[in-house]
Image (tube, rainbow, N blue to C red):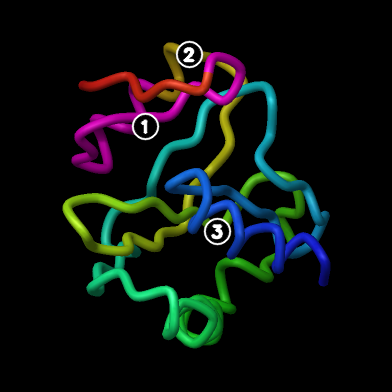
Amino acid sequence: MSNLINFKNAIINNGGATYNLLTGEFNPTNGYMVSIKDHEQVTPFNTENLQYEIARYIRSKADILMSGVFDVYFLGAWIEDDNLVLDVSVKVDDASEALKIGVENNQRAIYDCKNGVSIYL
């Protein structure tokens, strides 16, 4: 549970975070995060409602976030244009595979966990 609190605090303090609800992995330091099409939710960013928005999103996406694929599906969040973006992401070790999945899912970018940068497609 403390990683979920860290997740919320990282959104506020760092502008984003990634968290695997099943393994507890928080902000991986290797691999690439790729958002899955049709799982993004965008709402105005408000620190007072942040915990509620995170809980509501987890509840709506529990089927995938809590699936049996323990090391793949992550809850992702970032601040963009004064909005909170929540998504379901997959962690992929290979850069070319991550880029391929990103294109297939109509994403604008993937996230390089090791270097802490977005790679725009």
Vertical arrangement, residue 43 with respect to residue 8, above or below: below
Quarter of image, res 27? top right
C-alpha gap between disc 2 and disc 3: 20 Å
- Labels 1, 2: front one: 2
Residue named by callout 1: 101
Q: N-terminal of the two: label 1 or label 2?
A: 2
Q: N-terminal of the two: label 2 or label 3?
A: 3
Please name the residue shown 72% across and 47% down the image. Answer: 26
Region rendered in magenta? 99-115
Please name the residue shown 59% across and 64% down the image. Answer: 8
- Tell me the amino acid under the disc marked 3: Leu
Point out residue 58 in the picture as x, y percentages from the top left corner: 54, 78
- Labels 2, 3: front one: 3
Whether the residues at callouts 3 and 1 have beta carbons within 8 Å, the answer is: no
Quarter of image, res 113? top right
The image quadrant where one finds the C terminus is top left
- Tell me the amino acid under the disc marked 1: Ile
